[in-house]
Image: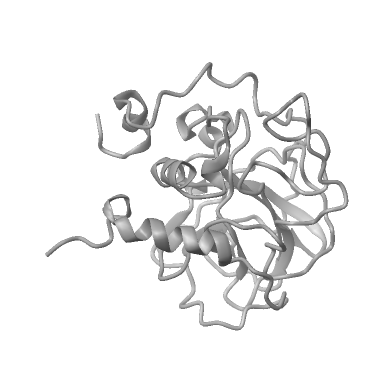
Amino acid sequence: MNDERRWPDRRDLLGMIAALAAGGTTRESFAQTPTEDLGPPLLGARACLLTPEAVQGPYYNDPKLVRYDIRENKTGVPIMLRLQIVDEACRPIAGARVDVWHCDAVGLYSNYPGQGDDRAHPVSTIGESFLRGSQFADAAGVATFKSIYPGWYPGRTPHIHFKTFLNDANILTGQLFFPDALSEFIYREIRPYSERTAKRDTLNKDDFIAIGAGPGSFASVTEEDRRYLITLVIGVDPAARSKASASMPPEGFGPPPSSAPPLRDPKRVSPIVPGID
């Protein structure tokens, strides 16, 4: 039997995702809570370790937008992001507020100036609020967002930022990360990601923030019919207070590597595909 789940080898996947990227993010009802069946809670037998703090980064602001669909007018590969907030005893924390924010398909954050691949002609998104939002965790501790797969920007591997609040106190600031092989495929093959002339310069193994966050900050990715389901269990100490810094430069810790080898170069494939030497 052929393994039809091996997305890199399925020709029709390109058409499906490309169609979704082009038209799957048209503005629908921006409901504050999802109305579709999202399946069972995330938590299983996995140990409830505390999620490490990660640097806040320079692009956080709180637009006070409680909403499930954070895409606005942004196109890209559709994702459903599900974050389950639990304490160290694996008890879901209902009512916790979760803020998320990330860049669009071409590496731009909303409401910030001086961005983009062309440093001579920087892009400003001041006044915009795309790809930002808040949700309150349900009885299972789950906060859910509809969004797009994030792009990249110089010096950073693709990621989504999150903050967790309890009784208005920020108890954790973190980032979640994605499999490099999936990111490479999307950035190479799917518009608008593939329309960039700049080349991605940082893989997971090169990103100091991803390295510091550890394996517990890498999301589980499930391919569904018309989207990717991105899930992460976030372990928090309800009595903690976030000490994450916002002082990092926009392009991460220090200069990026001089260049990343081409996708089909063994030196690039080896670090992004598990088990390939």
Q: Residue at x 72, y 74 (%)?
A: 30
The one of 246 and 226 positioned closer to us in this rendering: 226
Residue farthest along the left direction in this orientation? 1
Q: Is residue 233 above or below residue 274?
A: below
Does 23 sit above or below residue 208?
Answer: below
Residue 154 pos. (x, y %)? 62, 30
Q: Quadrant of the N terminus?
A: bottom left
Question: Is 251 placed above or below 221 here?
Answer: above
Q: Residue at x 15, y 61 (%)?
A: 2
Q: Nearer the viewer, residue 152 or 117?
A: 117
Percent x, y of residue 239:
72, 56
Name the residue: 65% across, 49% down.
Answer: 104
Number of numbered discs: 0
Residue closest to the eye, 231 or 228: 228
State which quadrant residue 21 falls in. bottom right
Left-right relation of 17 to 254: left
Name the spot of residue 249 as percent of width and height, x first. Answer: 74, 28
User: Where's residue 255, x and y in %?
Assistant: 63, 19
Please state if 137 lies on the left or on the right of 185 as rendered: right
Q: Quadrant of the C terminus?
A: top left
